[in-house]
Image (cartoon, grey):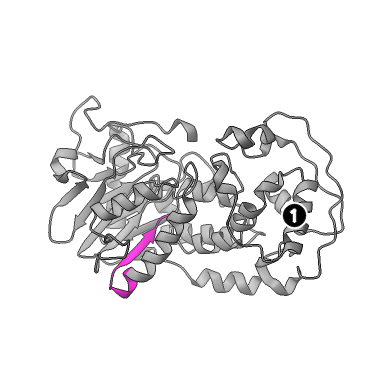
Amino acid sequence: SMRRLCLLALAMAGCEAWSFAPSILPVSHRAGSAHLLRRGAPPRQGRPLASPPASLSRSRGTRGVSMLWSDPTTVQNDLKERTPTVLPAVDRLVVVGDVHGDAQAFRKCLQIGGLIDDEGAWCGGETHFVQLGDVLDRGDEEREVLQMIMKLQKEAEEAGGMVHVVLGNHELMNVELDFRYVTEVGWHNWGLLESKEEIEFIERQMEALCYPTFMTERICAFKPGGEVTKWLAKMPVVLQIGDTLLVHGGIRSVHVDFGLEKLNHVTRKWMLDERESRPVVLSNGESPVWTRVYSTPFPAETVLTELSSVLSRLGATRMVVGHTPQAGINAATSPDGAEVWRVDTGMSRGMMCGKAECLEILRDGPITVLTENGRVPADERRLQGGGGGNFGFLSDLGDL
């Protein structure tokens, strides 16, 4: 893809710059930078790429952007650091949907779920907490949210619990350097460039490629093999805990045929290794991070039949998805009792300032929606019959 060619060109030294049409470049939400990335502008010829400073050598591994390919040994080691695809049932499971760079909303959900105390420390004991992806984009507090998650992962593990993140479409978009939903604040302070010499070298490459230099830090952080991407690559596209299947958009029959473990593996390999192409299984609107078939108010009979088949094949009884904002956490149910819970409430201020809610699943108890006003029994959020009720579908038009 053109984005991959741009990454390759960024890594090369002593050759002529690639020139390309800015129509492939990301567009910021904020007017302050959008004019720099206007679509449809004629291509500009870049200047020749400069030779890298001595400090940017192959010995620096994936940290040095002058490196043509990711180091194979580093990639193989990173591939071993991952979350398993299937975990045994746990006593308490709490799930939250899309955060989109809103630390305030995320913190409120964690408090509602009884997972953090007033100081922000883990108090959830052995609870397993799952955030269903789309941590990134739209909001100004992406780094704060990521730091909260990393901190809570360590604290939860020490207490016998776990914090999981399932990859969303916005995480994968950033790895592809698709920055259409980055806010003006989101370009800076990733803290991955070590010296003035390194910064100046990379900025010269950015200018030669017609990339605005304010993108430098984010590109270095999120490119395949970048420091943030290496952390994200430990996270699965799909996770099953006991009889609960957790995924950002949804798992279709074709994904079960492909294999969930294989799906996670090829995604992780692509995120870590610049030589890999994006997996075909992630490359269309019905991929596990993009599909919305389970998130319409009342899915078609054929969709509910497929849901039952998918869950039966995987030994699960419910699927939990995010991706498509709802007016409140709710479930659609097939005639034979298979359920899909939709937990994206559009809580971020970068979306629609929706409700802060969590889904609680107990091994020996009921499913409950946790809200600011208390606990709501699952039956009150299971949609029945026609019409949208109070918990209908809100299309995430910005992603379409």
Q: Is the residue 125 above or below the residue 29 in the image? A: below
- Which secondary structure, mark 1? helix
Q: Which residues are magenta?
A: 156-166
Determine crowd level at label 1: few under 14, some 14-19, many 20+ residues with C-alpha closer than 10 A: many
Q: Position of residue 215 (x, y in %)?
A: 65, 48
Q: Nearer the viewer, residue 310 or 47?
A: 47
Residue extending farthest front: 119
Residue 281 seen in the figure? no
Q: Name the residue carrying label 1.
A: 10
Q: Position of residue 176 (x, y in %)?
A: 60, 49
Residue at 20%, 47% (x, y): give it: 369
Q: Position of residue 96 (x, y in %)?
A: 32, 50
Please state which amino acid type lies under the numbered disc 1. Answer: Leu
Q: Position of residue 396 (x, y in %)?
A: 42, 34
Q: Does the segment drawn in magenta span residue 257?
A: no
Choose top left, top right, bottom left or bottom right for residue 225. bottom right
Q: Is 366 placed left or right of 193 in the picture? A: left
